[in-house]
Amino acid sequence: MTTRDQRPVLVVGAGPSGLTAAVELTRRGVPVRCVDRAEGPSTSTKALGVWPRTLELLRRMGAEEEIRRRVLPQRAMRYYSDGRVIADLRFRDPDVQPVCLPQPDVESMLRDALAEAGGQIEWGTELAGFQQDGPAVKAVLRDRDGTERTEEFSWVVGADGARSRVREHLDIGFEGATHELSFVVADIDLDGPLEPDVTHYFCSPRGILVTCGLPSGRFRVFTSAPPGLKRDDVDLAVVQQLVDERGPGGIELRDPDWISVFAVHSRHADRTREGRVFLLGDAAHIHSPAGGQGLNIGMADAHNLAWKLALCWNGLSDTALLDSFERERGQTARAAIKQADVQTRIWLLNKPHHVALRDNALRVASALRLFHLDYLPWLAGQRTVYAQPGFRRRLALPAGGPWPGSGGFTEGGLVPQRRIWDTTSSRRMPLRSALSDLRHTLLLLGDPAPGGRSARLAAWVSDQCAGTVEVQVLRTRARTLRPWTPERPASPSGPDTTRIVLVRPDGIADLVCPARESWRVRRRLEGLFAPLLKPADIPENRADALRHPPEAA
């Protein structure tokens, strides 16, 4: 039986991944120690692109107003070949529209969310070493003055970047490839004909040039470096020359506040879990910035782990739940690495027949809007589907026919973000946003038949899983969401046509089935919340706490 562990969770690294883990664990009542060996937050802009799924996570943490104030929404991605437009991908659907939001702003929002939840960051504190000892991890923390202390933690989350000490201490391999060319990046003032709300990709035999506007009014310039170019060789004049060679002309650069040269790697850790220690973000995988996925995938890693870790720490689930973290996030990381690597290689094509094939393919795909069918939703984080061992994808449509414009609910996939009327908040909002992100949701699609299988399942969940699973009814024709209430005395009714969706705290449909298979949902919940459903095995002072965890208030 799993019981609550009073030891805190140690989060190593206060970048986007580590901060997301710290915020989400703290929101769920788990004590966290978040340490970073740096003396304070980084001011380097680093990552820029933030996609809708990540914005959704930030809004859940209370960053709505800050998002509105800080972002520069992107209107399109535009591809050129030798100065001619070959593809213009416009973001007409807000569900796939990215924003430019520099990493320091993202980290600032996350630090505010952590403080609001009651947590803090210990700057100037590094992890000197650790060892796993049964149900605990004994970690040696070193302060600014060199003082070391050994403390015990229930779990350790390594979010300490590509040169992760956590990963190195575990002797986990980080194999992969490095692109032959290096790249030059600069944040700079730019005068010229480029729209700031469009990401421009200039492909030519001389190299790739990417530009996009920043919320500050400046521009990010990213271009492939000539062979042998070193950081000390790069100044404003060199960047200007590269832009003149590869851009549309008429662009004048001035007043850079950051110029750097870096290599692009594609690497993935051999494993992202070792006992009670996990790896997130760049500590687990790095890849080309093509597609702008790095920060987004790292934050998704952290969110995926945090809600599972919180259930285990609070004694609500067995630690077997954590086995799914490496499997699920590994699927996403491998797909992102592959996508970024392919796109980077496409950028750098220079043989005439390869260039002609690329340009024609992009023209056709753009004209037919093929990118909008799959590629952009995937970049936006809306097409996540976690395949399970022996997984057979089941597609279930809501009762009464398909939801207009929707493919339905897919096991392992995100709940559709279709707008509904939420009776609890008395406002219209996206369905996924209306569901709890602190607990599971039993979602009944249709009107449960009194005395039917779905109504009996709802009653069992309300009785046995109170505080950990919400029961909601979605009337699909009326597009109305309301909390389930115990049925009136049974009256004659037809067959129970309700569809049942068990939704995880991260908005993923864990299980989708018709009412006649309601036993599948009960079996899943009995396995997931086994400790909760065995009150006889729990001390009296714990039984009530388990039924009413801190986040249920």
Image (cartoon, grey):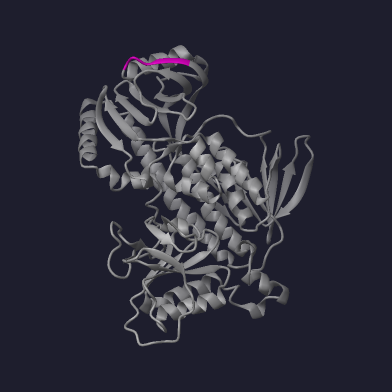
- Residue drawn where x is 60% and y is 57% of the image: 275
Q: Foreground residue, 82 or 229? A: 82
Is 346 left or right of 36, judged from the image as shown? left
Q: Is residue 131 above or below residue 88?
A: below
Residue 209 in sight here: yes
Residue 176 in sight here: no
Residue 117 placed where, x, y %? 64, 51
- Residue drawn where x is 69% and y is 62% of the image: 5
Residue 82 placed where, x, y %? 26, 22
Is 137 left or right of 93, judged from the image as shown? right
Q: Is residue 277 above or below residue 401?
A: above
Number of marks present in the image shown = 0
Q: Is residue 5 above or below residue 42?
A: below
Quadrant in the rendering for residue 508: bottom left
488 within the magenta span? no
Residue 73 placed where, x, y %? 41, 36
- Residue drawn where x is 55% and y is 42% of the image: 16
Is 367 left or right of 549, judged from the image as shown? left
Q: Which residues are magenta?
A: 249-254
- Residue drawn where x is 42% and y is 65% of the image: 481
Residue 35 placed where, x, y %? 67, 43
Q: Quadrant of the N terminus?
A: bottom right
Residue sticking out furthest to the front? 426
